[in-house]
Amino acid sequence: MFRLALTLSLATGPAWSQDMLTQCVNQCLFEYGPAGSPAHDLCVAQLCMAAAPAPEAAPPPTPSQVPAPALAQPPGPIWRADPTLGTAEIRWRGRSMAFRCDAEGGSISVSGLGGGGSALSFAVDGQRLDVPFQTRDGTHYAQVEPESALLEALMAGRQVTIVAGQVTLTLPLAGSRRAISQVMADCDPTP
């Protein structure tokens, strides 16, 4: 989504304002950690500095002039795999969704929604999926089989929307296919 906003700004605006540059740098800070970290610095260099106009110089680059890696790697929430923990996860604003390899095959967890006893409503790209979740300590869990409709939808979709009571969480599914597939390939549920 941030990549789309960046692309639209470049395509429609005559130049980046200082506010837009600050917003870009802050987004990198939020998503990739403190200034000075390699991930943050790469984000700023590829997306913010590559797109910002040189002081009193040439006009801002068009999307076709921005280096391909900058457009291919948008900052923002993206699914990541940690095969050592058997987890594929996305985190955003204190909330998270994860697929974990476990003794039963796999589970999906959603945390940070509150609504302890609330049932979850789950939709991928607007298609509702009935998934029985249980709640423990504020985290919602569901056992899933590797061939489940839920996992297939998460790996093929563009976004997932989860509703718990009055709270709605929409997360992108960017990187979910790669991350979940990687964890599933390394998963050995036998004890």
Image (cartoon, helix red, strand yellow):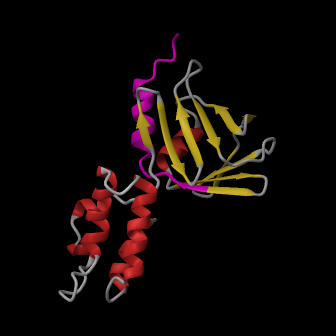
Task: Classify residue 73 by image quadrant.
Answer: bottom left
Q: Is residue 80 above or below residue 6?
A: above
Q: From the viewer's perspective, is 129 left or right of 103? A: right
User: Looking at the picture, does residue 82 appear above or below residue 161?
Assistant: above
**Occupied quadrant, residue 34:** bottom left
**In the image, residue 185 lies in the stretch drawn in magenta:** yes
In this view, the residue farthest toward the left is 57
In the figure, is residue 164 to the left or right of 2?
Answer: right
Q: Which is more toward the observer, 156 or 1?
A: 1
Q: Is residue 112 above or below residue 186?
A: below
Q: Is residue 8 visible?
A: no
Q: Which residues are magenta?
A: 170-191
Viewer-side residue, 150 vs 187? 187
One can see residue 105 in this view: yes
- Residue closest to the eye, 50 or 98: 50
Instruction: Give the residue displayed 24% in from the left and 59% down from the top.
Output: 69
Residue at 31% over, 63% down? 44
> Where is residue 42 shown, x and y percent of the image?
28, 57
Q: Is residue 84 magenta?
A: no
Q: Residue at the spot x=46%, y=65% of the render?
A: 1
Relative horizontal placement of residue 17, taking residue 154 as reference (left or right): left
* Residue reaching furthest to the right: 117
Residue 46 placement (x, y as % from top left): 26, 63
At a point 37% along the width and 84% down the height, the residue shown is 17
Q: In the rendered image, which quarter is residue 4 located in? A: bottom left
